[in-house]
Image (cartoon, rainbow, N blue to C red):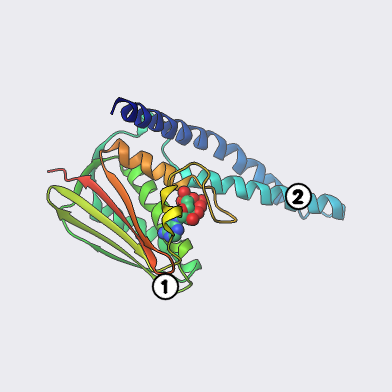
Amino acid sequence: YYAEVQQSERLRTTGELAAGVAHEIRNPLTVVKGYLQLHRYDQSLTPAVKRSYTLMIDELNSAEHVISDFLTIAKSSKEQMPETVDVKRELKNITDLLLSYGHLHDNDINLQAEEGCYIAANSVEFKQLIINLVKNAIEASETGASIDVRAVKKKGNVEIDIADYGCGMSEEEMKVLGTPFYTLKSQGTGLGLMICYNIVDKYNGNLDFQSENGQGTTVHIRFPLEI
Ligand code: ADP
Ligand code: MG
């Protein structure tokens, strides 16, 4: 039991550190990429130099992928304070925001959320959690497939389900979910779920996966209901 507590404390610190580092690195990357994009079409560049500009921009884009899995917006652990999160309202905001991302793959995100689903968490981190999970659902799905997001109150908890009808996972694959850098995607970072487990632990929640190879995946999230 003691070892378990230490483990989750360590993970929490890692998550907060990661969010801070991500924020500090994102800004300089954005500046460098901006200048590269500005100058890549300069007439004076030789073809070889032009090619190296393209390579540099590609590399910066993959660094951005890593950072966007941590997102965010939260500048430091001090800004990650618990508050009361209205799950229905936040889910609506998040799914609206993700629609632009979903549209790239033409996925529909269906949201059904009960009123009165309040939890004690931080809204920025809650957003990060849901975005990472819905992104995974979209990435696992075929073009045009829908994704169902539901939230209900049940036995003193708020339960949120995110269901996709995509590639699914084998039992072996499910055992290692949340391991840093575990990814099966060519553009993946393998950091999204690690962050999700961190956030759920931090607010006394629970995260589990139900999946069938070739059928799809449902992520169950549970947080204590705040009254
Ligand atoms: P990434 O998305 O960068 O690969 P994650 O930590 O978000 O990293 O996910 C790790 C791996 O878990 C993914 O590469 C994928 O193999 C698997 N996975 C996560 N969510 C799903 C899902 N909804 N359906 C199928 N596989 C999934
Ligand atoms: Mg991911």
- Give how far apart the Cα atoms at labels 2 and 1 are: 37 Å
Residue 171 vertical placement versus 216 (above, below) = above
Q: Please state which of residues 81 and 133 is positioned toward the viewer in this rendering.
A: 133
Residue situated in front as seen by the camera: 12 or 176: 176
Q: Residues within 10 Å of mark 2 (few under 14, many from 20)?
A: some
Q: Is residue 94 above or below residue 80?
A: below
Does any portion of residue 149 appear in the rendered image? yes
Q: Mark 1 highlights which residue?
A: 145
Outermost residue, front side: 172
Q: Quadrant of the N terminus?
A: top left
Quickly name the residue at label 2: 53
For residue 135, side relative to residue 153 (left or right): right
The residue nearer to you, when weighing 207 against 85, is 207
- How many dots with numbers? 2
CB atoms of marks 2 and 1 within 8 Å: no
Q: Residue at x 49, y 44 (%)?
A: 191
Instruction: Residue at the far bottom: name it.
Output: 144
**Residue 19 x/y as whole percent:** 45, 36
